[in-house]
Amino acid sequence: MVFGDRVFVRRPFFSPSAYRVEKLREVLNLTVFKNALWLASPEFYVQLEKKDFNYELLGRREKFTALKFFNRMSFRSVPFGAFAGFYLAPWAKSGVRKAVVGQSARLLMLPSVERRMEIKATASFDDHTILALNPTLYGITSGWRYIRFVTEKNAKLSFFAYQLQYDEVDARLLEHLSATPLSTADLVAFLEELTGCTAEEGRMHLWELLTEQVLLSKDTLSLLEEDECQDSFCVDYREEAPLLADLFSREGRFNGRSFYAGLEIKDINRGIEEHWQQEISEAIGVLAKLSGSRTIVPLEKFRDGFVQKFGERRVPLLEALDPDLGLAYDGLLEMDVHELLNGLDFERNGQSADPLEWTPAHRLLMKLWMQNANRNATEPVEISAHDLSDFQTPATAMPPSISVMCTPADTQLILNSAGGAGANALTGRFSVFGKVFRDYCQVITKQESIANPDIVFAEILQVSHRKIDNINRRCLLYENVIPLNHFPPEGSLLPRDLELFVKAGEIILLHRPTGRRIIPRLSTAFNYRHNDMPLFRFLCDLQYQSVLGSLDFDPERLFPGLDFYPRITYGKVVLSLGRWHLRREEVDHLLLEPLSIGRLHLFCRERHMPVRIAAGRGDQQLVFDLSNDSEALFFLESLRDPVIPVITEFIEGPARVQGAGGDFSCQFVIALFNPDRVYLPVPPPDAGQQGIRDFPPGSEWIYIKVYTTTRSAETVLLNILLPWVEQNRRRIEQWFFVRYFDPESHLRVRFRANAADVKDLQFGLQELLTGDPASGIVQKAYYDTYQRELERYSEALIGTVENVFCEGSEMICRFLSRGPDQNEIDAELWPVLHCYHMISTFFGRNHEQLIGLCQWAAGSFFAEHGGGKKLKKTMDDRFRELRPRLTEQLRHGRSEVNGADGFWKALKSLAHISMALGSRKRQKLIADMVHMQVNRIFPSGQRRYEAFIWHCLLKISVTAAKNGTLTGDGFIAGY
C-alpha cells in the first residue's frame, strides 16, 4: 500500500490542556462556545440564553449538559458543527517542530438537508419543472414496479415496492421520457398530441405521477453539492465574531438545525510524523492476518440463490432483486405447503444463528491473553512478529484505497480504525467544505481508476433520512453515479441499465449499454444498514465483495460478553485500547446517595481502571481525570444516563500537535492506495455462447404467458392447451411449459414451429385462450420474446436441453392426467422416484458421484431454508415414514407413467454429451433438470419440495452405496 502525500487532520476546537471543570463559568460566555452550542442544540441554547448564560442561574442538569459540550469541545476530534475542526497537512519531518505564528478558522454553513427538503417541498410545479423517471422503475407483464418512500415521524425514510398498472398512454409517456429528463411543458405537449387532452389535463396527469413518485422532479433534494454552493454562509470563526443566533434567529426563520456546518482550521500545516508510516504499514499487515477474509452473509446467500435460480445468466439488476421475479435480498418470502411436506419445519431465512468460527486469531489471543500465566491479568497483551509466523496472509486483495484513522499518544500510535471499501468513506463528506478538500477526495478517486482501468466506479445516490443525511452529502467525486430515489444527474448509470451475473463465485455488476463492469461506491460515513431499501443495501454490500474491507481488530467480537478487555499492541501501535464494561448493579452501587468519590476510587482499584478514562459508546465519549474531584463527580453524574457507558483507557502524552492556544489532541485520517489492479473487467462471452439467443414474437419459437390462478393452471394446461397441441402435432415441432410467479401465477409456454405456420398458430392460440371455456379462467395472456439461457447451458447443449424440457413436459402432463390403468403408481412418492431415476441416468451405479451430487444439492437447499436442527429432524422423521414404501417401489414397483420412453432417451442423450463438462458444471446441469421437473409437478412452493426431495435422494443414494440393492434400473433398462 502507498501512502498519500497529505493527511486529513481532525481536532477539537479547544486545547485539552486548558480544560478544567471549574472553567465552565467563563466558557459559557465565550462567543465561540455559544455559536457551537447554537449549531448543535438550538433548544438548549435558548434555554441558557433565557438565563443570560449565567452559571449561577443554571440548574443541575443544565450545568451537566453544558459541561458535556465543553468536554466535547476539548477532547473529541470528530467534526460536529463548530465543536471540532479539520484541515489538510503534509507529513511532518521526524523531530522537526514548526513554530505556529497564528491560527484562524473558517466556519462554512450550508443549508441542512431538513431545511433543503422544506424549501423543495414548497417549489412550484409549472411548465419549467424538469421531470425524470424514477430510477427504480422497471417493466413487468402487468405494468411497472418501482420503489417509493414515505417519511416517518422520526424523519427516517421507509421504502416500499409499488406497482403501476399498464396503460397505453403511460407506456408511451414513460418511453418518451426514458432517454433524458424533460420539462413539464414538453411532456404536456407530448400528451396533447398523443391523446388530444387539454394542457391542464396533461399537467394534472403528470402531477399525479409525480406525487406517486413514478416521476421525480429536479427540484427534489440533491445530495450532490455544486462546486460553489450558492446558498452557503461563511464566517471567520473567532471570539470577536458575531453571535450566529443574532444573525439568524431574530428573523424567526432559522435556528442551528437549519445548517450543516464545517469548521476549517487555517494556518496550520503540521501533520503526523512520517516515521509512523513504517509502523502503520506493519500494523495493516498484522490486521489483515488477524481479521482474515470475512464474508458478507446477505451477499453470500444472495449469490448462492442467484446461481441456483439463474445459473450464469445475465439478469437485469431490478429483476434480480425483485422478491417475485428474482430473490429478496436479505430475506425470504413465505410459500405454500403441499402434503408431501407435512410435518416439516422450514425456518425463515436468517433466523438460524451463524455458527461460531474458531479462527487463528482466537487461538493466538487465548494463548497470549487468557492462558499466559506470566502476565498480570490487566497488563497489555503484546503481539510480536514471531507470534504471527504461522499466520497466512489472506489471498483476498486489499481495496483500491483504504483509510487508517489514528491518534499519536506519548510514544505509541493508537489505531482507531482501518479499512473501508474506499478511503473516501471517511473524508468524502468534507468535499462540500471547499475546493482544497474536494481536490483531496478526487485524488483518491483518480488513483483508484488509474490502478483499475476499464472499471467504472460509480457513486450511490440515495436519500435516507431528513436529519442524518447531512453526512451523506458530497461533491461529485466519481464521474458516474447510480441514482436510486434521487433525481438522475449527468453521468447517471440508471438501475434499469444494469445487469447481474455470477462468474467464478463473484457477483458482477454490468452496465449493459457499454458492457463495462461497475463497482459501486458510497463515499460518506453514513451507516447504510440504517436504511431498509434492499437495492441500496445490496449495492453498498457489493463494495466489500472480494476485498479486505474491514481491518478493525476488536477482541470483543472474538470473545463477546466479558467485563474487561486488555490493551493489545503490536510494536508501538495500539491495536485495541483496554476497556471495561460496567454492570447495572455496579452503576447502581456507585450512584448511592450521597455520591462518594472514595467509593469510586475503591471501585477503580478493584476493577484496575486507570484515572484517565473515556466513557461512552462509539464516538459519543467524554474524557475524565478521576484523580480530580470535580471530574470524578462529573463522571458519577454521567452514569445517571440510561445507557451504561463503556469505559476505555485514555492515553495521552507529548505527541499532541502544537497550535495557537495550546497543544491539541489530533486524530489523523490517512489514505493509502493499492497500486495493483483489484478488479478485472467483464470477461467476453464464451466462444460457444454466440448462437441465437432471442426469439421475438413471430419467429420460430412462440412464447406465451398465460395468467391464471394456481388452482386453474392445471385445468388450462391439461384441458385447454394439451388438446390444442394434439390437434396441431404436425405443425408443432416441440413445446414445453414451466410454472411461474411475477408475482401473479401463470404458465410460461413455448412452442417451436416452421416459420410458415407461426402466424396461424399464434392466431389460433389467441382465439383458444379468449374463447370458451378458457375465457372464464384465463385472466390474460401475452406473447413475449423467448430468451435462450445460453450462459447457463451453452450453445452446444441448448438444443438437447430444450428436447429434455419438451419430453419432460409431455411426461408430466401424462402423470397429471393419468388414467385408471396407472393406479399402481404411488402418486405421493412418484416425484421422489422420478427424480432418483433422473440422477441415476447420469451416473448409473457410480455411487460416489451420485452421493456427491446429492450432498451438494441437499446441502444448498437445506441452507436456503434455514438449516436448523428442527428442520433436519422433521425431514428425517418424514423420510423414515416414507422409506418402506420407497424401498418397495424401487425394488418391485412400477414407478413410471406410460409413454415415458421419449423423456428417458432425451435425458440419456444429455447425460452422454455432458460427460465432457467439469464435475461442478455437470452437477449444476443435473440439478437444473431436476428443478424443471419439480417445477412442473407441483403447482406452487416448488423449492420446498426440491429441498425435501434432495434430502430423500441423498438418503436413498447412501443406502444404495452400502448394499447395492436400490439401484432402480427397472423400467429404464435398454435406453
Image (spheres, grey):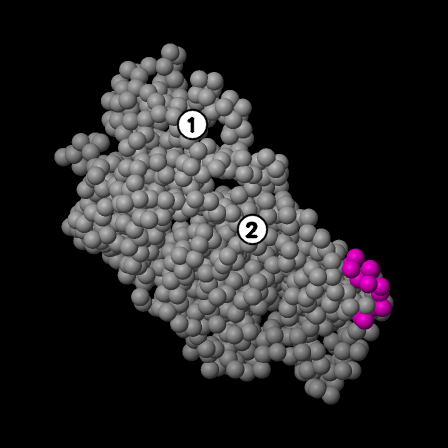
Q: Position of residue 698 (x, y in %)?
A: 71, 81
Q: Residue at x 31, y 48 (%)?
A: 268
Q: Position of residue 420 (x, y in %)?
A: 38, 53
Q: Is residue 331 visible?
A: no
63 relative to 410 in the view: left or right: right
- Front-most of residues 99 and 836: 99
Q: Position of residue 118 (x, y in %)?
A: 63, 45
At label 2, the amino acid type is Asp
Residue at label 2? 231
Q: Residue at x 28, y 32 (%)?
A: 17
Q: Position of residue 194 (x, y in %)?
A: 80, 70
Element under disc 1: loop
Q: Are marks 1 and 2 in contact (CB under 8 Å)?
A: no
Q: Give the prevailing secondary structure in the magenta stretch.
A: helix
Q: Quadrant of residue 186?
A: bottom right
Residue at label 1? 28
For the residues labelled 1 and 2, the Cα–Cα distance comes to: 30 Å
Q: Residue at x 18, y 37 (%)?
A: 372
- Front-most of residues 179 and 10: 10
- Per the rendered image, the range of residues in magenta is 193-205
